Amino acid sequence: MTEHPAETHAPSTPPAEPTIATVTFLRPTAPAASSEFVWDDGTEELDDQGQPPAAAAAPQPVVVPPMPTQPPAIGPDDRTVVLETARVILDKNAARDLPESKVVATVDLDDFADAPLIPAWMKTPEGWAAWSGVFYRARRRDFRRWVRRQRTDKGHIRQFGRGVRRSHEWVVGFEGVRVQSAAHTAHVLTREARLAARHARFTPRILGAKKELAMKTAEKATKAAEEAVLLHKKAKKDRNRARNLRAGVVYGPPLAAIGSGYAYGGGLGLAAGLLSTFAGGAFVGRKPYDEEENWTTEWRSLGDGDRMTAPMLDQTFRAAKVIGAEETLGVVQMPMLDNRGAWTAVLDLPPGVPAKRAIRATDELAAAFGVEEAQVSITKKGRAGRIELYVSRDLPFTDKPKPGPLLDLEKPANFWGPISIGPDVRGLPVSISVVERSGLVGGEPGAGKSASGNTILLDAALDPRVILWLADGKGGGDLEPFEALCEAFEGDADPEAFYGMLQDLIRDMKRRYALLKKLGKRKVAEELANQHPELSQLLLWVDELMFYTTDEEYGKKITKALRNLVSRGRAAGIVTFCATQKPGSDVVDTSLRDLLSIRWALRCTTPEASDTILGKGAAASGYSAKTIQAEMRGAGYLWAEGTNPVMVRADYYTDEQVAVLLERATEWRRQAGTLPNAPMALADQLRAQGGEDAQILADVLDVFTAHGTGDGPAEWLPGQLLLDRLKAAGHTVTAEKLGALVVRTDEEKAKRPWGEKGSRVAGYPLARVEAAATGRFGLTA
């Protein structure tokens, strides 16, 4: 057919909406006769003789309707115009009689045959071969990647190697350090014992004292060497036992898995056991040694987790300038770990280097070790040039304190013997004796003075023989729980009342010395105090001394009285302890402070404040309470026994535990008959006065008590009820006489309801009766 040029017809008026498609009209033409049969797709087909097929030889003309001369009208709602002429032209099979072989079969998209989910490659051997090749190549690439990975830290072989190493290190443990240290100590002491024995053997007997001293020295050295050898044997035994136990834990399961697998499964079971062992070792060593990568051979420190060794000690002491660059330390006891995980060693400094030089350099040594100052403790060990070094793993005294030993007491304490203060940095208990001693406790606010003082106060309270005199300059109630056990107590922070209490104590001290002179004794001892209770130990505890000594009117008097008691009262059995925040010379006179022999310096803000407690030069010698951290509550330098202060944390008792211990102390004092008498009731005081009027008022107060409730006596009672009870008690009292004894105001005479019926009657208030009794006889309610 021939296509004529398109003619486009536009509507005469603009459409309401834009048209969607352009319509092209095709002019119909009759098909020309041809010997060729051309299919719709343009192909030509002939029969075997080269002629067109029979159907094609006489083609039937296609009837095409005439084209319209006018374009069809487009309705307002039509979007697309489909011409009938186009339908006829596009219908290829409408007027054709084609052979069945050339008719294209229709495809049914819903027909999936009998295997709709099987891929096409699974239906042919070539597909299976291709798929197998892909799997093989993928597995080969995975194996190559696995082999390359083994060279890295995350490879399974590397992991298994690390796991074996870590397991073996855990089996070996640190007990070998203790064995080496014990062996070294045993060798050193054995050599010293041999030298001492040789010296004693060749010392002539004619020298007498020197021979005896040499024999004693040799005997002592031999005993020390034998103890060191026994400790070495015990350390080896403990090491072998611990290693065997850990070896069973580590190596037992793999051997059991391999053996049982081979026994039950043969070669396959053996392979399974080896594979499981390999997997377990790789799991243990799955994390690389990242922490070791930062360690260098130039410098090692305990703060980085390294082990203490003799070369490290030499390097550290040289860095702190305790020893020279060419000098070395003599290791008496090799560095070893204690049961708290801290390193300890006994060292001999080079000749001519005193121990105090190392003690003064505690800060420098701590910096060289890579730890805090409070973690390093250095003490002199037996001789001027020998020290004991102790470096704790963590900051000491920051863990939860353990229950104090006083809670386990089943019988009264003995204040004449050692008093438990608390543990030192090594965890060993520290005890002091306060017999013929006096003490000073100081530190900044919040350092733990009250809790530290409880260790001494509770020990004294639990001894029924000790007499307590307490003064609370704070007035905050810290000492109030002890008031019921005290013979004298000042809790109002009143300097005048405290000065009067000191005067009474000085008079008691004079009576004690008079009795000692009569008995022919110079000082009070435990046996003498047990025979004469009036010579029992007396503890004077003054809290917040600064408040009393800085008073303008009584400050100097109080200082003078305290100096008298501290200097003279010790032999008479009077023990004085003072606690204050700032024990400077403006607070505590040096003439008094120097007499206090026991010093306990809790955390201070400056080294100078620490020196005011421990003494001048203590901070420069390495004993400064400034180094105590805020987390170390209750810790301080205690200078009581020995030549150097010791870091101690006081035993801590909660308020509930203090109440329990005071109840126990009250019961023990009641049984011993030493519980101080409670203040007499006003009625008892009236009876002690004697006289008819005092007896009447006493019986009136008893009536108020009898009609009281659990909250106390009655506050008001009718007058007739009081008269009836007085007559029943044998008193001849009229209403006029009772009114003369207890004078009331007009308001107090007013009637009040009483009884079940609520009848209004006149009566007496309790406050007016007490006021009449105290005012007339000069008593206290």
Image (cartoon, helix red, strand yellow):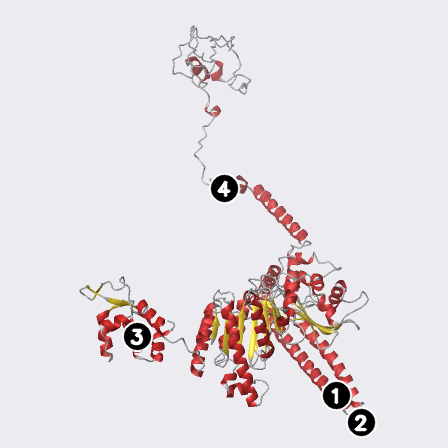
Which of 553 and 13 lies nearest the eye of the viewer?
553
Q: Is residue 389 left or right of residue 446?
A: right
**Dot 1 surroundings within 10 Å: few (below 14), some, or many (20 or more)?**
few
At horizontal 33% and vertical 75% (from top left) the residue drawn is 683
At mark 1, the secondary structure is helix
Where does residue 507 sit, x and y in percent of width and height? 52, 79
Q: Is residue 590 left or right of residue 495?
A: right
Q: Quadrant of residue 336?
A: bottom right
- Of discs 2 and 3, which sits in the foreground? 3
Q: Is residue 514 left or right of residue 703?
A: right
Judging depth in this view, the residue of 755 and 167 nearest the camera is 755
Cα–Cα gap, marks 1 and 4: 106 Å
Residue carrying label 2? 206
Which comes before the other along the chain, label 2 or label 4? 4
User: What distance separates the C-alpha of mark 2 from that of mark 3?
Assistant: 91 Å
> How far is the residue under mark 2 from the one under mark 4?
117 Å
Label located before the other in sequence (2 or 3): 2
Mark 4 sits on what residue? 118
Nearest to N terminus: mark 4 or mark 3: 4
Residue named by callout 1: 213
Which numbered disc, 2 or 4, marks the residue closer to the eye?
A: 2
Above-or-below relation of 241 to 53: below
> Whole-percent x and y of residue 278?
61, 61
Residue beneath disc 3? 697
Whether the residues at callouts 4 and 3 have beta carbons within 8 Å, the answer is no
Contact, mark 1 vs mark 3 (Cβ under 8 Å): no
* Above or below 46: residue 368: below
The amino acid type, in three-letter code, at marker 1 is Leu
CA gap, disc 1 and disc 3: 81 Å
Picture quadrant of residue 369: bottom right
